[in-house]
Amino acid sequence: MKKGIGMEMTDESKFVLLSTRLMHEFGSELCLYLEERGMSIPHYLIEFTTFANGEMLPQIPHTIRGQHVFFLHALQHPDPNTAVMMMLITSDAIKRASAAGITLVVPFLSYLRQDRKDRPRVPISARLLADLIESNRAVRGLITIDMHAEQEQGFFSIPVDNLTGVTVFAEHLRHKFNGDFSDVVMMAPDFGGAVRNRRLARALGDIPVCILEKRRTGPNKAEMLSVIGESVVDRRVVMYEDMIDSGGTAAEASQKVAEMGAREVYLCATHGIFSRGAEKRFAEKNIAVACTNSIPRSADYYAQETWLTNVSVIPYFADAIYETTQMGGSISKLSQ
């Protein structure tokens, strides 16, 4: 994790929170947690006018001259491409409104899976996204959670505080299993997720870890091969992913592990995208999933999708924002 954003000013009147509509309820609750920390900052909704040809115009409802702006947004709604454009033009509007600086608070960053040139004639879109963000020199920092790969922080020259889902899922799992992990094993869904799952296993008291070997056969497709390491027979298995997209691979992995003799399979993911009928897939197969609200959804959605448990990261982000405004503040201590 890079060094925190650490602004010099601590007078709370110099800060303001702006959010897009999808993140507005998230932002309102975040402000309540900040008030509990003794920090009260104004929160405004950014409205968008859409022209007949589809162009968007953001409107900031209040003066922000001389204030440092925390801009809360998610790069998923209404779709990743539109969301990226919303972020860029709103950041420009904030700069031109004479804000002292901008900290992007973006729990979910799209395009981070495209972080390498793994075949001919493809882009490195994650690096391009970083360049686009930094093209606005008023942007002083970024707060997010569980980037697809930690080394993607190196695409940025601004400070990046990459929070970890381990912090919130460790607390969630302690509550779910009543602190008893005697028959629980962590399973990394692939070799790339082994480090993430080992960290969560350590946070839960060094519980055993195994790896599900699979071979990617295409986007959102994989062939399950075998389990490496600890046996899953008659065990409760927890699989921890950074994201679930269509859910096809995750659902197939859960079934494969169940066929191997696991007593229970529980999926955890920081980012729940749930595209291409993922909800129906998990509901029909009765697969239990826990996801954070990095991509917020309504209370009605959670009431309908009974297979899904919401694990809130709002207190975590509130603590992170608070620490960035304090002289000598530390975000890394939040994950200890």
Image (cartoon, grey):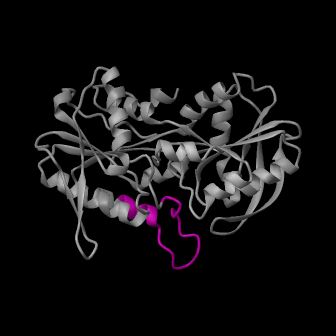
Residue 186: x and y in percent read 73, 38
Image quadrant in which you'd find residue 165: top right
Image quadrant in which you'd find residue 264: top right
Residue 274: x and y in percent read 57, 56
Q: Is residue 232 magenta?
A: no
Residue 66 lies, with reference to residue 243, above or below; the image says above
- Number of numbered discs on residues: 0
Q: Is residue 127 magenta?
A: yes
Over which residues does the magenta segment extend?
A: 112-130
User: Taking 25 as reference, is 18 left or right?
Assistant: left
- Foreground residue among 87 and 132: 87
User: Taking 82 as reference, is 276 left or right?
Assistant: right
Q: Residue at x 51, y 75 (%)?
A: 122
Q: Residue at x 46, y 49 (%)?
A: 295
Residue 250: x and y in percent read 69, 54
Residue 140 lies, with reference to residue 251, above or below; the image says above
Image quadrant in which you'd find residue 4: top left
Majority secondary structure of magenta residues: loop
User: Taking 64 as reference, is 70 left or right?
Assistant: right
